[in-house]
Image (cartoon, rainbow, N blue to C red):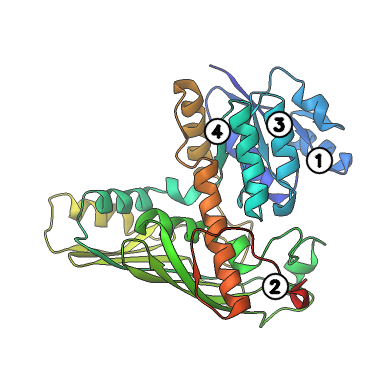
Amino acid sequence: MAVGFGIVGCGMIANFHAEAIAHIRGAKLVGCFSVPFASAERFAAERNCTPYEKLADMLANPEIDIVTICTPSGAHMEPAVQAANAGKHVIVEKPLEITLKRCDAIINACDKNNVKLGAIMPSRFGEANLALKKAIENGRFGTLTLGDSFVKWWRTQDYYDSGGWRGTWKMDGGGAYMNQAIHNVDLIYWFMGDVASVSAVTGTLAHERIEVEDTGVAAIQFANGAVGTITATTSAWPGFMKKTEIHGTAGSVIVEQDDILHWEFAKSRANDAKVIEKFSQKAGNSGGASDPKAISFTGHMEQFKEFIKAIETDTTPRVDGREGRKSVEIILAIYKSAWTGKRVELPLKSDPKIPKQKE
């Protein structure tokens, strides 16, 4: 079936959504909406779609089946809920939202209107990560013992100064964890299972005029008894590719960006050599380590394709709203621990309150 898309918010990330849609057979970008309207007009001219001055007018177009939300992080809820109420399926760029309350409002609106909800986590659709996930599901690690994630990126001061919303609690919802490392937070939970508790320290060490953290380390206790760490920073010049390391009593795998650096199990299998050969080639880009535009649209494309299939088969998307909520909850627990100096247990009963000096 032909699937029509509408995009809300025409900033940088919207280009990746548009590019993903353009590479899916049977998908078409129908319209876009942004504030100011001039942004939508420019985007529409570049992407050959219709710009809308009012979101309600775009949502009234019957040719649009799916609406993707590309607004600043703290402004996802309102258009997502409006789209769901209009009967459109909804895909929200990461993070789903910046508080659990706002995440739940999106989830509830989509449930109420019986529409699908997806949260953008393209790292789950990378082939190397899928191979690692399959190895875990097949029990090849024995008992999982340690899961570590590292996002050691670099962002210039100009990056934070380029938009009034960047680096603010109100619209960004956080810094290196909420904005950059959230993909690896999602991966580490996806690989290791639910998080039971976190203990963290964070700081703002390399940037000025921002409210949020640019550096942090979190110690994780998983529900299955394993432990791990999540390191996140935008203060590590010149920026390094993100890395995930999974260890168990019978195996270890290290993935850097989209490459496998180490793949070894106590009981080898015939296809292990093929896996190593296939994923040992260096990725062609930096994965956004120092430039937020230096990412590929292919992860978005694969996630959009899977989302369309979920609509056609009336199944749950791989990363639905509830899955997208979990990475936000883990990050909020990390912030709460850093603010209070105490270990924080999950699930959270409510959104942590930002200390006054942090507001």
Evaluate whether residue 124 shows in this view.
Answer: yes
Q: Position of residue 305 (x, y in %)?
A: 49, 32
The type of residue carrying mark 2 is: Thr
Q: Earlier in the sequence, mark 4 or mark 2?
A: 4
Question: Could you tell me which secondary element the residue under label 2 belongs to?
Answer: loop
Residue sitting at 66 percent across and 55 percent down?
A: 99
Give the residue number, with chain letter if any, for mark 1.
Answer: 34
Say if mark 1 contacts mark 4, CB within 8 Å.
no
The type of residue carrying mark 4 is: His
Question: Could you tell me which secondary element the residue under label 3 belongs to?
Answer: helix
Give the residue number, with chain letter if any, for mark 3.
Answer: 83
Q: Is residue 10 left or right of residue 345?
A: right
Q: Nearer the viewer, residue 276 or 74?
A: 74
Say if mark 1 contacts mark 2, CB within 8 Å.
no
Give the residue number, with chain letter if any, for mark 4.
Answer: 23
CA distance separating discs 4 and 2? 32 Å
Question: In the rendered view of the protein, which quadrant contains the C terminus?
Answer: bottom right
CA distance separating discs 3 and 2? 35 Å
For residue 195, above or below residue 227: above
Q: Earlier in the sequence, mark 1 or mark 3?
A: 1
Q: Nearer the viewer, mark 3 or mark 4?
A: 3
Give the residue number, with chain letter if any, for mark 2.
Answer: 156
